[in-house]
Image (tube, coloured by chain):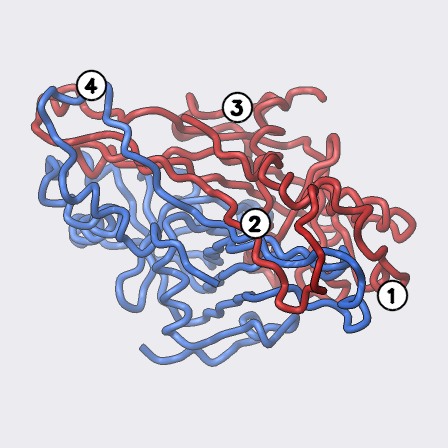
Chain colours: A blue, B red
Amino acid sequence: MADQAPTNRTKLTRAPDRGHHDRETIDAVLDAGLLCHVAYVFDGAPVVTPTLYWREGDRVYWHGSSASRMLRQSAGTEVCLTVSHLDGIVLARSGFHSSINYRSVMLFGTAEQVPDEEVAAVLDHFIEHLAPGRLETLRPPNPQELKATTVLSMPIEEASAKIRTGPPGDDEEDYALPIWAGVIPVTTTLGNPIPDPRLTVGIELPPDVTALYQTPWARPTTD
Amino acid sequence: MADQAPTNRTKLTRAPDRGHHDRETIDAVLDAGLLCHVAYVFDGAPVVTPTLYWREGDRVYWHGSSASRMLRQSAGTEVCLTVSHLDGIVLARSGFHSSINYRSVMLFGTAEQVPDEEVAAVLDHFIEHLAPGRLETLRPPNPQELKATTVLSMPIEEASAKIRTGPPGDDEEDYALPIWAGVIPVTTTLGNPIPDPRLTVGIELPPDVTALYQTPWARPTTD
């Protein structure tokens, strides 16, 4: 898990004090999320699609239907995968310094298709990420489902994290103004499970579902 | 506010029943968000950056430092702007049908730089979107700040929304399995305001900040 030397694309030109290139920080931001945005070039123009993702060691994975245009087009091409968490609204004493607190990661690289023989195993890891402990309770995938699923991955190599925390950074002379300033925390939380209306009578909420509240992406962070 | 005829890029090839091209649906998804992801092409490769955005009528706006590489590179070029809200974890009886509930919008078009003489007015709209009622309480922007800020915009023309709601869609024969299935709602909420440690003693929390809890992007949606 080597730290990432900044490249021309991952060196932060704006607010460089918010930038991080160490793997511990990058992995923490990645592991706190469920939804990423993958950009690729389609007929010369940029396209960015939201999709579920997960990390295994030094790689990030995402998946979809084998008939998906996004997956078909981006396999073997350069992509940019970005994960962003909104943590707070920063209300400064001027519009100019009003901002947000956030954690984000950008990864650059080539999307590689996961070979057929490895798809079942990496999809198991995805279910374990989505709902730890749930995998062994589910109806296992059949060959048609595995064939219908394409998984792409990219190494965590050309990567950077950008993080803003803390109170507003106002102009020194503005602190004396009679204006309220501060941060409104933004938190993503899980609500009470809604059972499928077609759930068989007598099936209780299992421990793996209640454990969801302890998964990394469901844990609120504090500033 | 004409509805959007699907183009080759906005016609949904996967799960077309989740697609919407009417402006009411597109605007509702846009107005419920604060952070978007803008993709552009940089030296032939895709880049996607998270950034704040706001809608005014038939256009979407985003802004940043005039020194920002993203803004410099994307002005006058084709971009793709995507807004995504994660609404729930859909736990099916198989991994294959496990999914998420979400609302997303993709816009395609050319990023246009807002002329200097209009920047002050559109930034006022941004502050009104971020925190309605706050604008008139703030120290106004000065000429240096306006010069240091670049605003880009694009029309809502080539656009589509994609929405998934409701319970899992399992294979018919799987409903009889003794497996819990359902949806875990995901909600983004605002926490209690954290006053700036440098806040002048005696400044109370103003109504515009408490009103933040009623802004569209802070209102949780129900499934």
Q: Residue furthest front?
A: B202
Secondary structure of the residue carrying numbered label 2: strand
Pointer 4 and pointer 2 on the same chain: no
Which residue is at a point 47% across and 81% down the rendered structure image?
Answer: A5
Q: Quadrant of residue B47?
A: bottom right
Pointer 1 and pointer 3 on the same chain: yes
Which residue does the numbered mark 2 point to in the structure image? B37
Return the x and y of residue A83 as percentages of the image width and height: 46, 56
Give the chain of mark 4.
Answer: A
Decide: is A143 above or below A4.
Answer: above
Alpha carbon separation for disc pair 4 and 2: 37 Å
Which residue is at a point 46% across and 76% down the rendered structure image?
Answer: A21
Q: Earlier in the sequence, mark 2 or mark 3?
A: 3
Pointer 3 and pointer 4 on the same chain: no
Return the x and y of residue B4 as percentages of the image width and height: 63, 24
User: Residue B144 has which mark?
Assistant: 1
Alpha carbon separation for disc pair 1 and 2: 27 Å
Which residue does the numbered mark 3 point to in the structure image? B20
Q: Are marks 1 and 2 in contact (CB under 8 Å)?
A: no
Pointer 1 and pointer 4 on the same chain: no
**Residue mark closest to the camera, 1 vs 3:** 1
